[in-house]
Image (cartoon, rainbow, N blue to C red):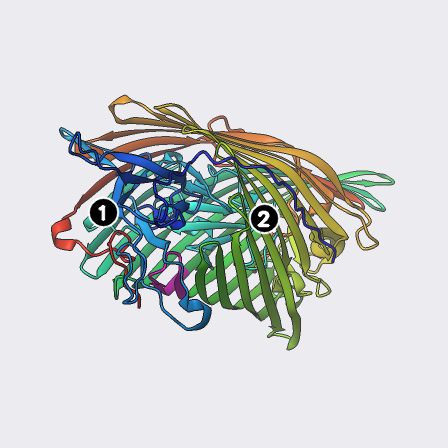
Amino acid sequence: MKYFLLLIFFFEFSSAAFAQNNTRPGSIPASGHLYGKVTDENDAGLAHASVMLMTLQPDSARNRRPERLIKATVSKANGEFSLENLPAGGAMQLLITAIGYKTFKQPFSFIPKGPTGMRSAAAPPQKNNGGAQGFINPFDKDIGNIKLFKEVKNLQTVTVTSAAPLLKLDTDKKVFQVSRNITAAGGTAVEVLRNVPSVQVDVDGNVRVRNATPQIYLNGRPSALLPDQVPASEIEQVEVITNPSAKYDASGGHAGIINLVLKKNKATGYNGMLSAGADSRGGFNAGGNFNVKTGKFNFSLSAFTNQIRNRTTGSTQRMTRADTALSVSQTNLNKTTGGFTFGKLGIDYFITNRTTLSFTATQTYGQFKPAETIDIRVDTLFDTGIKSFTGSRYASGNRKITGSSFQLSAKHNFPRPGREWTADITYSTRNVDGTGFIDTYPHPSTWELLQQKNNMKARVKLLVAQTDYINPVSAGFKLETGIRMQLNPITNDNENFIRIPPGDFEKIDAATTLFKTHNTVYAAYANASGQLNQQLHYQLGLRAESSKLTGAQTHTGDVFKTEYPISLFPSLFLNMNLKKEQQLQFSATRKINRPSFYQLTPYTDYTDELNITRGNPGLTPEFITSTELSYIKKVNEKNTVLASVYYKYISHLIARYLIAGENPLTGKATLISTFVNTGAGERYGAELTSVNTLQTWWELTTNINLYRSGIRSTDRNPMPQTRLWSLFAKMNHNFNLPAGFTIQLAADYQGKTNLPVNTNEGFGPPSQAQTAAQGYIKAFYGIDMAIKKAFLKNNAASVSISVSDLFRSRRSMVYAEGPGFTQYSNRLNNPQLFRLNLSYRFGKTDPAVFKRKNMKAQNEGTIQDL
């Protein structure tokens, strides 16, 4: 495997800050170094905070001590700051300000250690471990973590609180705040992701990033729960990580990671919210959450139910060319009723000021009843003439889906800022039980009626145990290490029966399979980060993973085992700070994508006669090399721009491919979707994200991605994927109007693009029997709109009205071709869906009763070591 790294960009840097040394000859030199970290109320690093160190100069004439600036800087993307070459003597004051936050002030002075071990009250004691560790620079002071609190002003009876930015651009990810995403009110994570920059969501709710399938995380860990099982009201923010470092899983390198961060309220006292809503198709939702924090405990409880009435229309035209020409035309109408219920319990126990134990449990239950009607017309061309016949196909079913997730985690913060240890165990399950019936009525009615029944049961379990340790060894160097174990057993049973009335249902062995699989992954990683100078920062990582996949078809006794030895996955990140609040970031990583059991098993799934799939036991893993170069510019306080160019190279690419076969249920020739390793895949492009406050009442977020992808041909894949340039664009307007009104207008456009390649299904067949190497998706666009009105005291209540796919334009139109066939299909799912939602917030805080010391003692004058 050949992969390369780009290492460029050395620029001359001019500092806007200046130092002033007031020491006299013979006094202590200007050799002081002060550093720390600025965080918000949730302990997240706060970028672009102004950090100033002031000196108090005596003014006998005015009998006061005016402040004079010594040195100033701004905090980095992770909140860290550093001030060097400071005067070592005299009284000083640290001043930290940020827009929307209260000003922080604290006296400060450097006091050299004497023979008795005197130290500054502003810095932690240093342990003497002998040797070089005993010689600590007495003027090198760690001020700790400084927490800033949001500015809240009472204007008579109205409370005005500064709003969090809609989109925050961190070093390695985009963080999207969803609390102001009113178009998703009453929906699920799927509706939330539809408005997140860089994320594409198709009509079936399939999520893509840069036209590839990402990994979906829940609170930073993989989960068996799907996005449509997580209510939008439970999501605090969405993190999009397009090129994950060695800290994250090596698998799933096609599109990175989308992390859904659930809400976790830690406000002192109690608070909660109730909500309810309905949509124009008869669906409804209701839910609420409650949180209370007192003493050493924080409790949270939430529940949500969403009942749906979905409607999908579509058509398919297929032409096959063999000894005879066969034309098949289908029109379909799908109506699905049902819904899901979601519940979550969270407990935090603050063992000490620096150690926290947390437990989170979620439970979901869903039941869906799909019903589909398909009208079919077949025209067959023989040498002697044309023979045509028509038929109808009625499908109905009942599917129950339950899911659980349990996470136990511990976190310990050490006195030195940034030094921490975490450990957690996450166990999640997803169970699917379903029965489906298909009746095929050929015309004329004298032909035989064919009935098909399918029983399906699937069990997915996922256990992830991980521990991480972060140690800022020095002011310019940090070491991060961790180990991880993942166990993923899956059971999938499919039984198919056919019946020709008045006979009984007979089991078809060729269309029945019962299998079990167990996937195990062990991993360890190390990341070293630091700064080569004031401008250039680096992070170098290495991850080692080994895995084993075992499987068995329990009804036949066939077993197989695939082992992947230890593989190394390096990562490199470079960050260069330029003048005028500009940054350059470069990253390069290596990833792997292992085939799932369903992709490997030779079993052919005939559950759906129109969507027949088969695995390929000869598949090998994909290896992905990803590089990305980004430029970030904060034009002013109201405008930030992020521009990126990226390139991915995938060797042994896994793609779906259509082959000819025979359906044992009907004895007719058919097309079967399977999986093959093609030659290699490439994906490259440029992306632009802009966050603008055009007016105090108008916010605009724009995302544009121009990309090209393709598959190279090989002997096993004689038909390469046509390389297409495609454009994906997304725009989101937020209007904050008088009288408590808010309007959101969101639009997205997807140009003509290649079909996504490997979606790596965990179990069950792909959603459509088509191949990425043999087709494309036509261009489409969609517009969503919502209006919200807040009322009552402190805007405690609100009502919102939203509509998705306002112009019925978000239609999936797919063209596929292969040896001997061409196929065109289109689908439209739930166009012009209106939702009405009501919500009410309540709560009370009492700091005098529930006040607790800060976990990291950020603002205390003395920080004691453990």
Taking the magenta stretch, the answer to whether it contains residue 261 is no
Q: Is residue 692 above or below residue 430?
A: above
Closer to us: 172 or 648 = 172
**Callouts 2 and 1 close, C-beta under 8 Å:** no
Image point (54%, 49%), residue name: 395
Residue 272: mark: 1
Asked where in the image residue 543 lies, by quadrant, the reply is bottom right
Determine whether, in the image, residue 54 is placed left or right of residue 779.
left
Q: Quadrant of the C terminus?
A: bottom left
Taking the magenta stretch, the answer to whether it contains residue 406 is yes
Amino acid type, mark 2: Ala
Q: Position of residue 626 (x, y in %)?
A: 64, 49
Q: Position of residue 11 (x, y in %)?
A: 60, 38
Q: Which residues are magenta?
A: 403-424
Amino acid type, mark 1: Gly
Residue 630 visible? The answer is yes
Q: Secondary structure at mark 1?
A: strand
Q: Is residue 33 above or below residue 151?
A: below
Kindly identify which residue carries mark 2.
255
Chain-order first, disc 2 or disc 1? 2
Q: Main secondary structure of the magenta part?
A: strand
Image point (40%, 36%), residue name: 166
**Crowding near the residue tagged with mark 2, few <14, some 14–19, many ≥20 C-alpha atoms within 10 Å:** many
Q: Secondary structure at mark 2?
A: loop
* Label 2 to label 1: alpha-carbon separation: 36 Å
Closer to us: 13 or 513 = 13
Q: Quadrant of the N terminus?
A: bottom right
Residue 316 visible? The answer is no
Q: Residue furthest right?
A: 383
Closer to us: 763 or 55 = 55
